[in-house]
Amino acid sequence: MSHHVSKFLDLTDLQRLDHLTELDAPCIWMSLYNLDDYMRFRNHFGSKIVYWFGSDVLILLGVLKTQTTSGEIFSPELLQNIVKSADCVHVCQNQLLKQELATIGIDALVRPLFVAPMDKFEDIYRHKSRPSVYTMVSGKRHEFYGVPWIYEIADQAEVDFYIYGYEGEDTSNVFHFPYLPESEFNEQIKQHQAFLRLTEHDGLSQSVMKALMMGQYVCDRIDYSFVSHVSKPNDVLAFVNELSSKMESNQDFILLEEVLNNFDWLVEFMTLNPVISEELQW
């Protein structure tokens, strides 16, 4: 079971069954990652909702490659035809994913969903006369995570930058750290005032939500109503150089409960399919 599915079940009263025992039962599909997932989807004839995150959209579009257990690579057109031939409701995390799905003829609702407790992290915001901001890199994809943007603006910025997960060369205000275990990382980031999420592609990142719940300022390359949106290095520069004045004015944050986890799509689905709470399948 993927972490998306596990957390979603924790958030709702729905159940998960390991096998499609009833091919006409209503079904919500999350995390369609491989050909086996799509074959199960094709063989299911009941009412469907597909909730799209980030990586599974890239797989559907052929940007990320996936393969069968035997190592066979399959075409994205095969996956697209399976999904498009089904009568189902599509829901996704943000406008970017909606636009990408639209390129292959799928019209999706945008409903940002954070599948974890909203009070998971304590508000521990700490004021600092010279703000420090952080970002994180996964794997060796520092360009994907926007690190070159930080290098481009660092000498004009009135903050210190902390980059976790990437070991580059430190400067007077850019500091690099290797990958840290989550518990140690969570302690480290408490000292900072803002988080930069500069990935080229994303669903709703848990790192963004973690920062918001800790009371930190956030800018994101993905456009959400509850964070500052940036689309180029100069936007990031403006964001970090405004931190001191924002901190002085104690700027209010958007109440996340008002902009996240709108389950209207699920309520309508359950109304039309009252059996779903007893026979939900993945």
Image: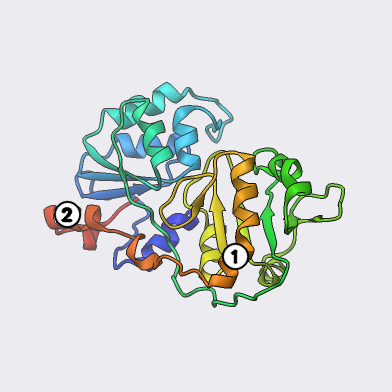
* Residue 118 picture quarter: bottom left
| Labels 2 and 1 touching (C-beta < 8 A) | no
* Residue 115 point in image, percent of width and height: 42, 61
Q: Which residue is drawn at the image coordinates 74% and 48% (left, top)?
A: 156
The numbered dot on residue 88 is none
Q: Which residue is drawn at the image coordinates 27% and 58% (left, top)?
A: 263
* Residue 104 picture quarter: top left
88 is higher (above) or lower (below) than 75? below
* Any part of residue 67 in sight: yes
70 is higher (above) or lower (below) than 187? above
Q: Which element is circle 2 on?
A: helix
Between the C-alphas of marks 2 and 1, the distance is 44 Å
Identify the mark nearer the N-term, 2 or 1. 1
Q: Label 2 is placed on what type of residue?
A: Glu
Q: Which element is circle 1 on?
A: helix
Residue at the spot of label 1 = 245
The numbered dot on residue 268 is 2
